[in-house]
Amino acid sequence: MNNNKNELPFSSSNYTMMLIGIAVILSGFLIMTFDGEEFGFGFLGLTLGPLITVVGFVIEFWAILRKPTHS
């Protein structure tokens, strides 16, 4: 393990995946707001939006736990 203090904890691919995960999470919340049913009880508010949000969190966890590839 390198003890270089100038080295970032993640590589650029990790940060890119984190940004993609944040975008997917935000799109899931946005999809939930498009539900036209009362109190959000339609397909978009109960199924599709939360599913996309969970996928975004999985992408975030994978980006954080992934071993950085420093070149």
Image: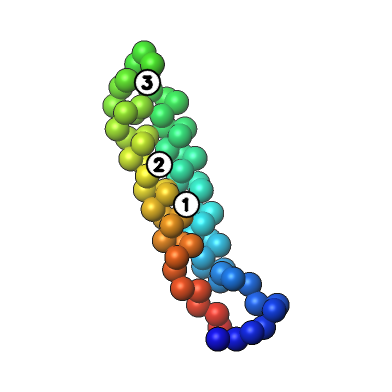
Which amino acid type is shown beneath numbered disc 2?
Answer: Thr
Q: Earlier in the sequence, mark 1 or mark 2?
A: 1
Indicate the position of residue 53 as horizontal and vertical percent values: 40, 41
In three-dimensional space, the C-alpha distance between marks 1 and 2, rounded to whole angstroms, equals 9 Å
Q: Residue at x 65, y 77 (%)?
A: 7
Number of callouts = 3
Q: Secondary structure at mark 1?
A: helix
- Give, as a three-letter code, the residue at label 1: Gly
Q: Residue at x 49, y 40 (%)?
A: 26
Q: Type of residue at label 3?
A: Gly
Above or below residue 38? Residue 65 is below
x, y percentage for residue 34?
42, 25
Residue denoted by label 3: 40
Q: Residues within 10 Å of mark 2 (few under 14, many from 20)?
A: many
The residue under the point 41% across, 61% down is: 62
Secondary structure of residue under mark 2: helix
Q: Is residue 2 above or below residue 43?
A: below
Q: Position of residue 65 (x, y in %)?
A: 45, 65
In percent of the image, x 46 and y 55: which residue is there? 60
Quadrant (top left, top right, bottom left, bottom right) of the C terminus: bottom right
Which residue is tagged 1?
Answer: 21
Q: Which residue is mark 2?
A: 53
Asked whether disc 3 touches disc 1, contact meaning CB atoms under 8 Å apart, the reply is: no
